[in-house]
Amino acid sequence: MVLSLAEQLQLLFFHCNDVTKSEVAEQLGMSPQAFSGRLRRGSFNLEELSKIGEITGCKFVQYFEMPNGEKIGSSVK
């Protein structure tokens, strides 16, 4: 089963009890309403996803995995 980005973010917030969506929105410099809309659509760029990871105490990693196991890409900072 492949989860959409919006679904992945909802799961992240379900499991992350230390920070609220409003706090994340504030730290990203957007209103809770704007954040909620973007959360529903899953419309965040890689830098924002990395920041959401930092705020929630998680690590956001992006890469392609080749058939031989080699990974192309890295965690986004």
Image (tube, rainbow, N blue to C red):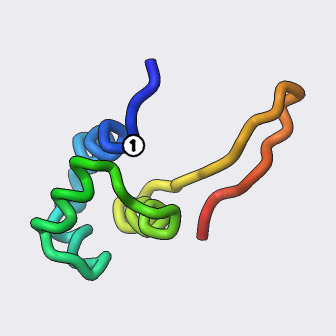
Mark 1 surroundings: few (<14), some (14-19) or many (≥20) residues within 10 A: some
State the residue in front, 2 or 19.
Answer: 2
Q: Quadrant of residue 1?
A: top left
Residue at the bottom extreme, as displayed: 29
| SS for callout 1 | helix
State the residue in front, 27 or 17.
Answer: 27
Instruction: Answer above or below: position of 39 versus 19.
Output: above
User: Quarter of the image containing the C terminus?
Assistant: bottom right
Q: Residue 34 placed where, x, y %?
A: 17, 67
Q: Quadrant of residue 53?
A: bottom left
Residue at the right extreme, as displayed: 68
Q: How many marks?
A: 1
Q: Quadrant of residue 6?
A: top left
- In the shown orientation, is residue 5 left or right of residue 27? right
State the residue in front, 56 or 61.
Answer: 61
Residue pictured at 39% horizontal, 60% vertical: 44
Instruction: Answer above or below: position of 46 versus 62.
Output: below
Residue at the left extreme, as displayed: 33
Residue pictured at 15% horizontal, 75% vertical: 31
Instruction: Answer above or below: position of 6 versus 1.
Output: below
Q: Residue 66 placed where, x, y %?
A: 82, 33
Q: Residue 71 placed where, x, y %?
A: 79, 43
The residue under label 1 is 5
- In the shown orientation, is residue 28 left or right of residue 37? right
Q: Residue 70 placed where, x, y %?
A: 85, 38
Q: Amino acid at mark 1?
A: Leu
Residue pictured at 44% horizontal, 60% vertical: 49
State the residue in front, 18 or 7.
Answer: 7
Residue pictured at 79% horizontal, 48% vertical: 72
